[in-house]
């Protein structure tokens, strides 16, 4: 079916207490693997592109590939901008047919984050596109973070309420203990904080950095109110491992289809497995 907006899909997840997987795509094989995994589970799916992936692929390529992928399957597919760091990329993605965007103003102080996010929301809403904001900081795994340091970066429930009402965001990414780009499931989520934010904020909550979170903790986070879970590092690990396995078996292989085909299948199986954990199987309607 044609690309759909994330708005009604996330609102359904919010009402029915499950989460949608938002999977970062880096090339054609990722996009095909993501829709195949979601199709196998009859689940709606969000395919997202970071500014880095957009720079690598070209915005017209990623928009065209995901549009064709969506039209080839009978499930709702969203094309989402992940971590838009300035208003220009938000405007560009909206213009190129993205059906959901994120503006990440978490590097700024509260007032500046509110001001810029409000502008991003206006840009997106003018074209009927929903916008995710971020409050609190989800750091990157470039060093080890102590629990105290992570707690200082976490989202305050009271500020979250003010942020959502002043910006008009459709969904909110929160900092609750996860860290970006973690290759081991060693992060502990603050489930009580998710519940506290959920009680203050009436839009779907988003978890970034899920690859470092245990399956049990992730399932509890969804029960507590997380409605969108971003998944990038797990896909990168599965894709790369499949390529390495192929070369370990066939060091002289030069056929790209035999190198990238198994990597595409590996992406599809991680996507299906995450969807089952998040509870969105058979929610394609
Ligand atoms: Zn993120």
Image (cartoon, rainbow, N blue to C red):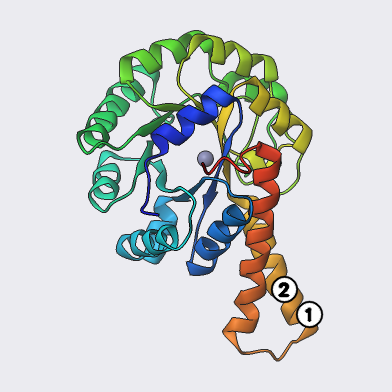
Image point 48% across, 55% down: which residue?
Answer: 74
* Left or right: 254, with 56 as reference point: right
Q: Quadrant of residue 252?
A: bottom right
Is residue 149 something that shows in the picture? no
Quarter of the image with the N terminus in it: bottom left
Furthest residue in direction left, as rendered: 126
| Label 1 sits on residue | 248
Give the answer, above or below, for where 114 lies relative to 129.
Answer: above
Mark 2 → mark 1, Cα distance in angstroms: 6 Å
> Could you tell me if the residues under marks 2 and 1 are in contact, i.e. CB atoms within 8 Å?
yes
Q: Nearer the viewer, residue 61 or 11?
A: 11
* Left or right: 266, with 180 as reference point: right
Image point 34% across, 59% down: which residue?
Answer: 63
Q: Residues within 10 Å of mark 1 (few under 14, many from 20)?
A: few
Mark 2 falls on what kind of element?
helix
| Label 2 sits on residue | 244
Image position, residue 75 (x, y; %): 49, 51
Q: Quadrant of residue 230?
A: top right
Image position, residue 263 (x, y; %): 65, 69
Mark 1 falls on what kind of element?
helix
């Amino acid at each position: 079916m044609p690309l759909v907006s994330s708005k009604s899909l996330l609102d359904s997840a919010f009402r029915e207490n499950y989460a949608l997987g938002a999977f970062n795509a880096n090339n054609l094989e990722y996009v095909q693997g993501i829709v195949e995994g979601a199709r196998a589970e009859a689940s709606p799916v969000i395919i997202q592109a970071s500014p880095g992936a957009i720079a690598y692929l070209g915005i017209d390529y990623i928009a065209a590939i995901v549009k064709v992928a969506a039209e080839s399957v009978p499930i709702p597919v969203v094309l989402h901008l992940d971590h838009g760091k300035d208003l220009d990329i938000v405007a560009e993605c909206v213009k190129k047919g993205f059906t959901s965007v994120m503006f990440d103003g978490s590097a700024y102080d509260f007032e500046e984050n509110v001001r810029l996010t409000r502008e991003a929301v206006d840009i997106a809403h003018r074209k009927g596109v929903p916008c995710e904001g971020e409050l609190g900081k989800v750091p990157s795994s470039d060093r080890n973070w102590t629990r105290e340091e992570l707690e200082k970066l976490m989202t305050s429930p009271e500020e979250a309420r003010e942020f959502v009402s002043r910006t008009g965001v459709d969904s909110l990414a929160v900092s609750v203990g996860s860290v970006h780009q973690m290759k081991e499931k060693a992060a502990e989520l603050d489930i009580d904080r998710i519940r506290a934010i959920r009680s203050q904020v009436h839009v779907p909550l988003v978890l970034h950095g899920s690859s470092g979170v245990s399956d049990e903790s992730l399932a509890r986070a969804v029960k507590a109110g997380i409605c969108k879970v971003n998944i990038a590092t797990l896909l990168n690990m599965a894709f790369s491992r499949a390529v390495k396995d192929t070369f370990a078996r066939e060091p002289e292989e030069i056929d790209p289809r035999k190198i990238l085909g198994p990597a595409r299948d590996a992406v599809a199986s991680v996507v299906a497995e995450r969807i089952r954990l998040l509870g969105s199987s058979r929610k394609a309607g």
